[in-house]
Each structure stands twice: as C-alpha cells, then as structure tokens.
Amino acid sequence: MRRFSRKTTVLSAGLAFLVIGGGVAFAYWTAGGSGVGTAATGSSADITVVQTSMVTLMGPGVAAQSLVGNFTNAGSGPVYVTTVTASIDSVFQDGVVAVGCSADDYTLTGAVMTVGREVPVGTAVGTWSGATIAFNNNTAVNQDACKGATVNLAYAVS
C-alpha cells in the first residue's frame, strides 16, 4: 500500500475540512412565525379661550370695544385652532337675568375670528382678536333697564 506524503495528507485534510466545513457554514433551519404589538395615539384636552380685554362702560354713543384674548392649553401637545367664535350668552343685572335688557340691546361684530395656527401647551399662549361689542343706541325706546348690566360672552373654538 502506498503511503501518502505528509504534504498530500495535510492538503487532503484541509480540502476535506473546507468541503465539510463549508457545507456546515451554509446549513440553517427556516421557520415562519407571527407576533402582535400595539401603538397608542394620544388625545387632546379641550382648549380654554380667555378674554383679556376689559370691556367697560358701554352705553349710548360709546364706540365699540375690542374683544381680544389668548388660550389655556392644558393638553399634552399643541392644538390647531382654526377659528374662535364669540356670542352673547346672556345679560345679567345684579346677579340675575336682566329684565327689559337682552342680547338684542348689543351689537357683536366680527364674531368669527380666524386664528389658523397651532396653540402650544401652556397658559396665556397664542392670541385671538377681531371682534367688537357695542351697546345699541335705540332712541325710540327707554333703555334704562340696561344700566349696570353685565353681558356674558361665550367663545367656541373650532
């Protein structure tokens, strides 16, 4: 029987290792699978409209006064405000609904005010303006019932 030289034996062993090892290096198992997960979407908190202008001493012949303000956003992120709409909610006198004086005795102009921007989180943030309120001077009627009345305004955000 013929004996292989040491060089031939080493070369053959190396070649065998590459063939066997190479086959092992490329062997793997495949498997399928599935899983589940979740992602949560936040929500917004209502934004509060704050009137900062002081409207006082309305009466016959007194010019219209501006309604101006800002917002309180107590949410966790900014809120986009398209418009602020002002309306006359009620008229009170001495803590009760006024008798003989109503919203018809006042004129609210520019009630829908365009804001068109994000209002950041915080107090006294962002601004709105554009509406005015005035007392209607009706010379055909006695308007003494409106003396000292308080006009309660309501604001809506969209």
Image (cartoon, rainbow, N blue to C red):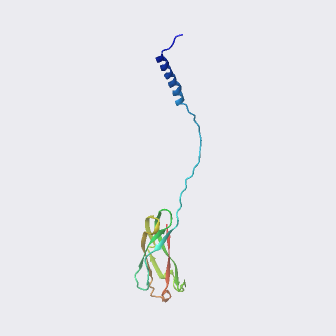
- Rendered location of residue 118, percent (x, y): 44, 63
Q: Residue at x 49, y 23 (%)?
A: 14
- Rendered location of residue 28, percent (x, y): 56, 33
Q: Residue furthest front?
A: 6
Q: Residue at x 52, y 27 (%)?
A: 21
Classify residue 62 by image quadrant: bottom left
Q: Which residue lies furthest to the top in this view?
A: 1
Disc tally is: 0
Classify residue 30 by image quadrant: top right
Q: Eyeballing the image, is 16 above or below 27?
A: above
For the N terminus, give its image quadrant: top right
Q: Eyeballing the image, is 78 above or below 95?
A: above
Q: Which residue is drawn at 45% across and 77% down?
A: 108
Task: Say left or right for 71 vs 29.
Answer: left
Q: Nearer the viewer, residue 81 or 119?
A: 119
Q: Which of 55 and 73 is in front in this view?
A: 73
Classify residue 67 by image quadrant: bottom left
- Rendered location of residue 6, percent (x, y): 48, 17
Task: Say left or right for 42 vs 58.
Answer: right
Q: Eyeballing the image, is 147 above or below 50?
A: below
- Rendered location of residue 76, percent (x, y): 50, 63
